Amino acid sequence: MQTEFPFQRIESTTNRWMTVVLNALFFVIFIPFALLFVLGPVYGIYKRGFEAMLYPTVIGWGLSLLILIPVIRYYIIKRKKIACKIVIDETGLSFYNSQNKIVDQILYTELRPSKRDFDIYKINPLGSGIAPLLEVTILSEKKEETTRRIDMNLPLKVVKNKSALYAHFLHGIVAFRPDLKVDPLVFRSYSIDTETWKVNRKGISLGAWLLFLAALIITALICGLVFLLTETKN
């Protein structure tokens, strides 16, 4: 099905201030963690000897490896696969990396009917009710039908027009795949006016503010723990 007008291409926009804060918090959390669990045991071995610090060192380095390996693997080794931009056009949804290459894609032609009452519906991760995601059924590269959750977030970036991206993607589904049924709750969850395909509410979502608050609390706890350990050693 074709629309009566050219389907607009839109891209994700970034809230620069919130993105800077988010990245700063990430490194503020990461650096004290590395000092506490990686360099801390080294300092303990230097001061108290290897035998006295054997078990604390094994535990500290073990916890470090469980967190540092995935972080290094994802953000350093596989950084070229990290999505930096979201684009929605007449073909579907595409995620681009820093080199402007597509790293993930969901095309309208890949969408398939689900075995539920509706084909496109919302999912609340962990039942939190804070940040609903879209769930769709697609035909995978292996020619198997599978469900995909669509999240309009980017790693270490705060997407400013996330609701508008959901609205435009849903507009594309209605325009190009009228055979699929969208759960009406989806439109209400994202405050989408289906006559104009505009989002009624504006500003940063509650989920984004809660995520920001959680990051601040975690940072404060880690910094406090490092401070207490330093005072204890002194």
Image: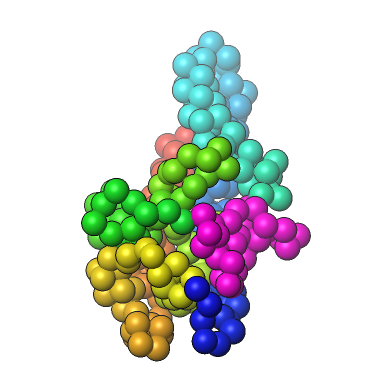
The residue lying at 58 percent from left, 77 percent from top is 10
Q: Nearer the viewer, residue 168 or 125?
A: 168
The residue lying at 58 percent from left, 56 percent from top is 105
- Residue at the right extreme, as displayed: 99
How many marks overall?
0
Up/down of 84 relative to 37, above or below: below
Up/down of 47 relative to 192, above or below: above
In the rendered image, is residue 193 in sight?
A: yes
Instruction: Read off the magenta span.
Output: 82-110
Position in image of residue 177 (x %, y %): 45, 67
Q: Nearer the viewer, residue 157 or 123?
A: 123
- Residue at the top extreme, as displayed: 51
Which of the 4 image quadrants contains residue 164?
A: bottom left
Q: Looking at the image, what colour scheme do you see? A: rainbow
The residue lying at 35 percent from left, 82 percent from top is 194
Position in image of residue 216 (x %, y %): 41, 60
Position in image of residue 172 (x %, y %): 48, 72
Based on the picture, tell me whether residue 94 belongs to the magenta stretch: yes
